[in-house]
């Protein structure tokens, strides 16, 4: 009870700018990763290419060995996405050691409009993990990870679709497992912050509107496929959309931390 | 007229998976970058660190030398963000050559819920650039880039805030200019796509709801700062919010490409 696990601070993951916004808590970092629809995964293609590569991928933190592990405990990062053959081949070739990669996720929660451009900012949450990626070869773990990742796209979708995947589907699917070495997060919330020189300048304060524009991701009304034969949109879909919208909007507004108008926006 | 500029295909930026979704058009790629609130920037911290690093940054494509250049012409990528001293020092040390970096942006436009997990997907737009980053040292170019980046956060904000930045603000701000070597984009739109084996399976089609959940970024009602002295939210703020919301929502829904219910969602 009361113990918060944190990632070790190394040169590579230590936040040097706006340190007070930094977090090394596993729970905070894993939550940002798990609530992000897209992760940006960086790796080095090889000695002949000077540029690191970035792929957008779908992923999720979890523990196959300890499925009951909670979000603030040590977890692996499972990636499934637009896996170019390059990252697959590199991970395959790195056998035993794994491919060094970086996984990042960022969410913008609000525009901070202050008196002067230099004090403009975003409310945001970002997380970065470093680790070694290997292909998951164990069939049971792969199937478990496929379910984990599918349900991250839409809660409870897996068992409501045609499962299990057949042999061809299993062999065409690649799951990368990232053993995490370190991680860090940054969270900025709150309102506008300006310097005294501007706050005391009446010409400026009477002319420049300051405040926060909350930003969040919205899920719209589901649009049935022309082939769809199920009359009603299922409850697990509509309730996921409603609760995610409420959560996203609620977070963006509460992050501002100043009194909100009671009137409903639309 | 009618000429579309494309980035050269090299190993590093050639899309091998779902080639029909790939684009090398400068206009398409630059538009994805410019409409993204956060860019993920990857670089290699140095020989002692096996992991590439990723920083979330704010950035924008533009041309200081040819300010009238349109979105589909050759442009540089200007970055200003949570610039750790590491990337600044690396870019400074790379003088003359520039620091090799990768810039990525991704937007999810919809959840594609098909019959089986393997055919699940997102509607999305993603872009990747490779290039060499250097610090902008010319004061006029730096000021121009600061205005460009500030106005990407909220259109027309720069001249409505306290400008120009003073000496201390100019020297504390770092702008990176990326000379782009190559780029690529991927765009997935449309509806559900399933395999014949599942579409012909009545047990499956009568049980599994299929369709698209549109996803877009929403800007909420502006929340004035407790220090704010301007009574009304200015028109350039409210109109930017309204038009961005309309555009974002409109794109996510039109990307589905199937008839939409006429009823307004909220």
Image (tube, coloured by chain):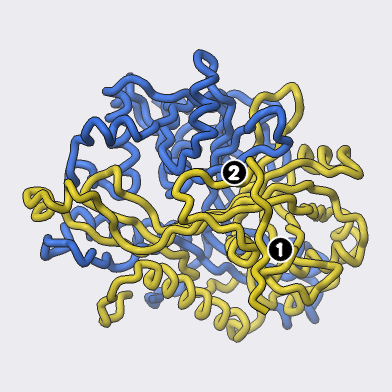
Chain colours: A blue, B yellow
Disc 1 packing (10 Å; few <14; some 14–19; many ≥20): many
Q: Which mark is residue A186?
A: 2
Q: Residue at x 50, y 13 (%)?
A: A96
Horizontal side, residue A131 vs residue A79: left or right? right
Query: How far across and down, in percent of the image, does residue B173 sit?
Result: 82, 55
Q: Which residue is mark 1?
A: B61
Residue A233 seen by the camera:
yes
Between the C-alphas of marks 1 and 2, the distance is 26 Å
A144 relative position to B61: left or right: left
Q: Nearer the viewer, residue B252 or B26?
A: B26
User: In front here: B237 or A166?
Assistant: A166
The relative height of residue B217 versus residue B230 in the rendered view (above or below) is above
Q: Chain of mark 1?
A: B
Q: Position of residue B88 (x, y in %)?
A: 81, 43
Residue A28 visible in the picture: no
Q: Check the image and report above or below for B53 versus B81.
A: above
Question: In the rendering, at what x and y percent does residue A117 appear?
Answer: 75, 66
Label 1: element kind = strand
Quadrant of res B87: top right
Q: Position of residue A252 (x, y in %)?
A: 47, 60
Q: Is residue A188 above or below residue A211?
A: above
Give the secondary structure at mark 2: strand
Q: Give the image quarter of residue B145.
A: bottom right
Q: Are marks 1 and 2 on the same chain?
A: no
Seen at 58% across and 67% down, the residue is A212
Residue at screen point 38% across, 76% down: A266
Marked residue chain, label 2: A
For the residue pair A97 and B187, the one nearer the viewer reads as B187
Question: Quick check: A46 above or below B249?
Answer: above
For marks 1 and 2, give the one nearer the viewer.
1
How crowded pointer 2 is (Cα within 10 Å; few <14, some 14-19, many 20+) is rated as many
The C terminus of chain B lies in quadrant: bottom left
């Amino acid at each position: 009870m009361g113990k918060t696990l944190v990632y070790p601070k190394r040169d590579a993951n230590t936040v040097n700018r706006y340190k007070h916004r930094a977090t090394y808590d596993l729970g905070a970092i894993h939550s940002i990763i798990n609530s992000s629809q897209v992760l940006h995964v960086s790796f080095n293609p090889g000695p002949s290419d000077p540029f690191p590569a970035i792929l957008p991928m779908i992923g999720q933190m979890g523990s196959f060995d300890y499925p009951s592990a909670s979000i603030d405990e040590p977890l692996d990062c499972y990636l499934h996405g637009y896996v170019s053959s390059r990252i697959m081949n590199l991970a395959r070739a790195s056998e035993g050691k794994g491919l060094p990669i970086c996984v990042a996720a960022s969410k913008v929660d609000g525009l901070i409009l202050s008196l002067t451009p230099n004090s403009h900012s975003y409310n945001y949450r970002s997380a970065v993990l470093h680790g070694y990626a290997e292909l998951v070869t164990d069939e049971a773990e792969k199937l478990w990870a496929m379910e984990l990742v599918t349900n991250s796209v839409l809660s409870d979708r897996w068992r409501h679709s045609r499962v299990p995947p057949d042999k061809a589907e299993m062999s065409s699917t690649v799951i990368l497992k990232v053993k995490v070495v370190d991680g860090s997060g940054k969270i900025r919330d709150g309102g506008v912050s300006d310097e005294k020189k501007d706050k005391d300048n009446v010409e400026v304060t009477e002319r420049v509107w300051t405040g926060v524009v909350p930003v969040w991701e919205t899920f719209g009304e589901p649009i049935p496929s022309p082939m769809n034969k199920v009359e009603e949109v299922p409850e697990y879909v509509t309730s996921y959309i409603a609760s995610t919208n409420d959560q996203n909007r609620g977070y963006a507004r509460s992050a501002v931390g100043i009194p909100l108008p009671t009137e409903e926006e639309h």
